[in-house]
Amino acid sequence: MDPDEQRFRDLRPRQRLTLYRELAVNVVVALLTVALVIVIAVLAAAGTAKLARMDGASYPTALTRAATAFAAVITLASAVTGALTALFT
C-alpha cells in the first residue's frame, strides 16, 4: 500500500468536521443577518413614529406609520434576498 494513500485515508473522518463547521458558520451568519435586518426595521419604525409624533399625529396614527415603515423594511430585505438568491444560483 502506498504511504500517501494511507495518509489520505486517515484524513477522511476529519473532513466531516469541516463540513459541519462550514454548515454551522452558514447558519450563524444567516441568523445574525436576520437579527440585523430586524434591528434596522425596528429602528426605522421608531424613527418614523417619533417623526410622526413631532409632526402632531395622534398615537394611533404614529403607530400605524411605524408599522408601515417596519413592514416596508422587511419587504425590502426579502426582495433583496430574493434577487441575490436568483443572481447567485
Image (tube, rainbow, N blue to C red):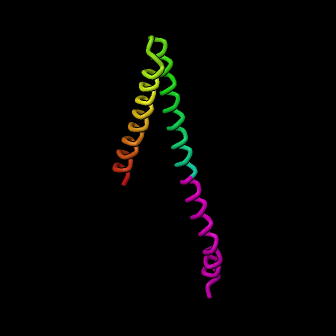
Viewer-proximal residue among 3 and 52: 52
Q: Quadrant of the N terminus?
A: bottom right
User: x, y percentage for residue 80?
Assistant: 38, 41
User: x, y percentage for residue 70?
Assistant: 45, 32
User: x, y percentage for residue 72?
Assistant: 39, 33
* The stretch drawn in magenta includes residue 26: yes
- SS assignment for the magenta stretch, majority: helix
Q: Is residue 70 above or below residue 88?
A: above
Q: In which quarter of the image is residue 68?
A: top left
From which residue to which does the magenta span run? 1-27
Residue name at image x 65 percent, y 77 percent? 10
User: x, y percentage for residue 40?
Assistant: 51, 32
* The stretch drawn in magenta includes residue 2: yes
Q: Quadrant of the C terminus?
A: bottom left
Q: In this view, does 19 lie above or below 2?
A: above
Residue name at image x 52 percent, y 49 percent? 30
Residue name at image x 56 percent, y 44 percent? 32
Count of marks placed on residues: 0
Viewer-proximal residue among 34 and 48: 48
Viewer-proximal residue among 17 and 45: 45
